[in-house]
Structures are given as structure tokens and as C-alpha cells.
Amino acid sequence: MKNSEVSILLVDDDAPFRHVLAGELRRLGYQVSTAASGEEALSRATDSEPQVVLLDLRLPGMDGIEVLKRMRDASLSGEVIMLTGHGSIDTAIESIRIGAFDYVVKPCPLDEIELRIQRAVERRMLRNRASLLERGLTPPDLGSSFVGGSPEFQRLLSLIERVAPSDSTVLITGETGSGKERVAKLIHARSPRRFSPFVVVDCAALQESLLQNELFGHERGAFTGADRAKPGLFEVAQHGTIFLDEIGEISPATQVKLLRVLDSSTFRHVGGTAEVHVDVRVLAATNRDLPAMVRQGAFRQDLFYRLSTITVEIAPLRERGDDVERLAQYFASTLSERFQCQRSISHAAIQLLRAHTWPGNVRELRHAIEAAMIVCDGPEILPEHLPPAVRRPAAVGSAAARLDGDRIQTLEEMEAAQIRRALEVADGHRGNAAKMLGISERNLYRKLRDHRLM
């Protein structure tokens, strides 16, 4: 930060000293204001909130310690450097315990004062950065964006309200695009941990060794290239919530380590021997059939029981009746604000939206409305503005709803057909196809193997 961007409040009752030091600091480019008493200092600090306060310990009336206490009580963010004489060093040290950044003994060379100022500015910037990161890890309450009136949706909201205040582990299940992460964020936002971090881990996006490193951190020298220690995401989420998305994708080795964290709230860094204790609530989500995976031996039964203390199941969009129309209207309204336009959805387009099976659920619906908003050049979204998969549902696969006469297509067959359709639209590019389907590329590879499409 340039000196000209740093504001300083100099508080000292010695007029000659105050005048000289203020002049020298201004010569160095700082923005400097002055005060001769504690009362004046508090008034100026409240009005202008300087980044650094040079505060004399001995002032007439209200002394420097009292001024410091009142600044902290008022939550003023400036870093305070105490100015003291040789006879008051013990008091100056005590001021650091109260909240001062540092102290200097008068008379003090100008270059030493400037060094302390620069360090104070650096600490303030680090504190602000940490605050921004913490706020970024603390999602807002998204309750107002949960739209629906169907019985299934109302039961979901009711369960969230009961589950959120507890500290129990929650397993959130539902199809791809149904909103599992949003449910996890709402549970966190309605919990006592809402002011602490909410950390998302995409378990399907990382290889086993990388996932363990991200979750549990590592010690310096744990592997080639580990030139410094790194905390794990469980530590980043301390006192908050960690959300393990796609939990069905983790390896047996990671399952063992995760079970230990859930049972004892302790783990070890990769390459470490010391026990690390954490206070973290765990939420997990999957679109896979974990009980079936347990029966097949692909997922630990004890871990499944530990994760599913409470299970929150999100109904697929096709089972939520009029919620398709409610959500479509909501997305059209919010996107109109974003695109600075006003577009409604025609009755004919609504009918097509209601007829679609929405294998990609709410995520697919939102993307369909966004695409329609972009290509529409009038005040109303018409059927021709909707994506081809919504306009011509029979085009997905060789027969959208039926195979071999009147036989209803299974969900597995529909998923395979949707994957083939996405690959066709993406000209075979698997990364782009995965984005269209709202899943990770690793998850797409697994589904391609499961459906024998590769």
C-alpha cells in the first residue's frame, strides 16, 4: 500500500513534538490528522476511522490506556501504536495485552516509527483479508431462494428446520441437479455454527491422495514438493461445517480415515504423528444408492450408519407437481433483473416445461430458462426459445418415454440416453458434456463405464 493511501491519527499533548512528527510523516506522504487529548482522539477516530493511531500513553484527563480501551469497545479497526517514555514501558507492554499493536519509546528515530507504521498497515491488511475469506466461507441464508409449494417440498423445508439446530451428521440424497449443496448451505445457515466457515469438498473431483491431502493437510516433507506444512479443510472448517459432496466416490482408504474423524473428531496430517482435534459438523451428499453400495462391499457399512444419522431426501423435480412452473417463473424473474430486461413465460412454453421429465432437475430447469432468456428477443418466452431437449423430449435417445411398444423406459435407460444426448451436443467432448449434465468429469467417466458407453 502506498504511503498516500495510509491515514494516521497522531495523539499527543506535547504541541512541539506533535507538530514536528506530523510534519515529517506528511513529508513521507502519509495522510495525518492530530489530536491533543484523549477526548479529541476518540472523536476524530470515530469520525474518520484512521488506519493507524499513534497514541501517547500519558495524556491530560483521559490517559492513553483508557482511550485504547474505548476504541476497542467501539470496534474501531485502526492499529494502535503506543508512544511512551522510558519510565512507562511496563504500562506500554500492558497496552499490547489490551489490544495495541506495538509501542515505541520517545524520543524515537523517524525511520523506526515508519517501520512500525508499515508493519501495522500490513497486519491490518492481513486481518481484513482474513475477514473477507471468512465471510466468503460463511454463506448467507438462502431460504428466500427455496421456491416450491408441493407437499414433497414442504416436507423438505420442515425437516431442514428440525435438523439445522442440532449438531448431528446429515446425509443429503437426491438426483443430480436437485439442489443438495443448497440444502446443506441452508442447514448451516440455520444452525448455531452459521457465523463459522462452511467448507465444500467435491470428493469426486480429486484423486485419492489429493483428496486426503485436502481433507487432512500435510506436514513439511511429507512428500516431494511439500516444502511447507499445510492445514487440511477439516481445520479450515473449525467450529463450522464441512460439506462432503459426492461422498459415494471416496476410496476405501479414505473411508477409514473419515470414519475416524467422525468417531473421535481427531485425525493426523499426511506425514504427521500428532493428533489434530477439530470441532466440525459434517454434512454429506450423494446421488448414488449407498445402501446398495454397502451390500456390494463398495462402501463401509459403519461409515454409512455414521453419516446417515439423519437422512434428508430431496424429491426429483418431476415428482414435485406445480413446482416446475413456480421455479420457472422465479428464474425468469431473477434473470430479468440480471439481464436488465422484463420477460415472461408464455402458456405454451409452460406446458412444455411441465411435460419435460427434467433428468437434470432444478439445475437443468434454470439453465433452460437462462438459455431461453438469451435467445428470446421479445417480451415473452415462446416454445421455440426453449432448448431442443425441452421442445422435443422424444429426441432424447431413440424413444424418450417408451421402448418396445408400451414398456416404460427405466431411469437407468433414461440416464444413459441423456448422457448420449449430451455427448452428441458436445461433439464428443466429455468435459463439456459433464458440464451440461451438471456432474464432474470423473463422475461422467464412471457413468460411461456403468452404462457401457465407452
Image (tube, grey):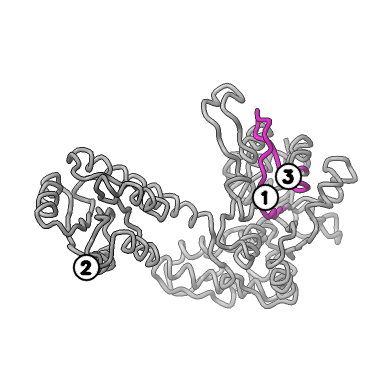
Extreme residue toward the top, this view: 224
Q: Secondary structure at mark 1?
A: strand
Residue 261 bears which disc, if any?
A: 3
Q: CA distance from mark 1 to mark 2?
A: 54 Å
Amino acid type at circle 3 is Val
Amino acid type at circle 2 is Glu
Residue ID at (69%, 55%)? 283
Q: Is residue 266 visible?
A: yes
Extent of the magenta region: 260-285
Judge by depth and name the residue closer to the eye, 397 or 334.
Answer: 334
Of circles 3 and 1, which is in front? 3
Q: CA distance from mark 2 to mark 3?
A: 54 Å
Give the image quarter of residue 409.
bottom right
Horizontal side of residue 327 vs 152, given as left or right: left
Judge by depth and name the residue closer to the eye, 352 or 311.
Answer: 311
Q: Secondary structure at mark 3?
A: helix
Magenta stretch contains residue 276: yes
Which residue lies under the disc numbered 2? 40
Residue 52 bears which disc, if any?
A: none
Q: Secondary structure at mark 2?
A: helix
